[in-house]
Image (cartoon, helix red, strand yellow):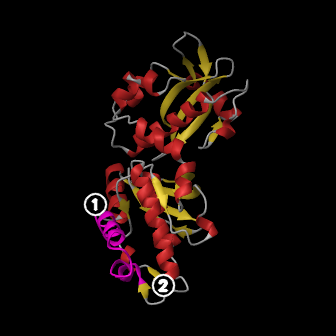
Amino acid sequence: MDLFFNELSVKEGPNKQTGRRWMNVLIEVFKKASSMGFKELKTTVDFFNFPLAPAYSLYDWSNDQTIDRESRILVKTKALKAPFFIEQLVEQRDNESHLLHEFKYKDQRAAGFGAAYLFDSLAVSLANAGEWDKTSVELLVTQISEEGQLTESIECVNHASKPEHLDLLSQWISKKKRVNIPNGKLLWLKRKEYFPHLILCKNIENQVSSFSGGELEFYQITKRLLELEDFCSTWTTDLFTPGNIPSKITQESDSRISKFKDELTIICPDGEARLFSWHSRFTPGAGRIHFFPDNSKRLIYIGYIGPKIQ
């Protein structure tokens, strides 16, 4: 797991002391994150040119003899380890998935947030504004396929600018460390271990077994399944409440149910045919995970994982 620096948090402070204080907090965040399993700090190409104060850039900070040597070396080594930059990582992932991505946070291009989304990891910011005093941000993700098909979605990215934010995210971090699903075949074979509250229908085996584990789709599929598993593990009411699941959850419209009733009706392992109208989305493309929540058993049946049914 790597940390991805949010370049939008950079601004010029009133003096060097303020800039140094911001960097001290960032280093505290990095050290604490390292103790929780994160390895490197991925930054954009121009990271060391970013200003911290008038005539005082991150490069100047890294050579400032008033800063303790350990902190300066830590930032240099962790921010300059191959593959070096966020831009390279995103380009590599785009080439692998045959997609182009654009990421925006409040109408601003957001490379760091975008990389954290692509790699399902943590974005970090300088603690220099109330804007960054939160553990989650919403990101507009635009994807363009080789065929020119454009899709947009709003995605949540976990985020920290203070050490205490990591405490609030500790449960998510622990789950990321604990659950490492290497490929689609093992997802199916160990489904009861990974997802004890989800019941995967037989056809899911064919739908996921071809994933080698490195695909962007596979990252997204496992993330969505883990969200459903987390929901079920704390499900205490007699009604399914989709608002308690981080990603967007919707039902098919009446017109689509009428048109695709056969495709949406799936035989479950208990022999009962159920209508799988509820679904979450995954990318790249218009991926869908169709599921059926069982209110009485507080379990969720997974009936379909694949492209949007057309």
Q: Residue at x 51, y 34 (%)?
A: 225
The residue carrying mark 1 is 83
**Residue 190: percent from left, percent from top:** 39, 23
> Residue 222, which numbered label?
none
Residue 75 among magenta residues: yes
**Residue 295: percent from left, percent from top:** 68, 22
Q: Is residue 67 left or right of residue 240?
A: left
Query: Looking at the image, which is closer to me, 162 or 196?
Result: 162
Front of the two marks 1 and 2 = 2
**Residue contact at pointers 1 and 2, CB within 8 angstroms:** no
Query: Looking at the image, which is closer to me, 84 or 286?
Result: 84
Which kind of residue does numbered mark 1 sit on?
Answer: Pro
Q: Is residue 21 visible?
A: yes
**Residue 106: percent from left, percent from top:** 60, 66
Q: Is residue 102 visible?
A: no
Dot 1 lies on which element?
A: loop
Earlier residue among tags 1 and 2? 2
Query: Looking at the image, which is closer to me, 107 or 245?
Result: 245
Q: Residue at x 56, y 64 (%)?
A: 105
Is residue 245 placed above or below 234 in the rendered structure? below
Pointer 2: residues within 10 angstroms few (<14), some, or many (20+)? Answer: some
Q: Residue at x 36, y 74 (%)?
A: 68
The residue carrying mark 2 is 16
Dot 2 lies on which element?
A: helix
Which kind of residue does numbered mark 2 sit on?
Answer: Lys
Looking at this view, name the residue that lies furthest to the top: 271
Q: Which residues are magenta?
A: 57-83
Q: Is residue 197 left or right of residue 250?
A: left
Residue 61 among magenta residues: yes
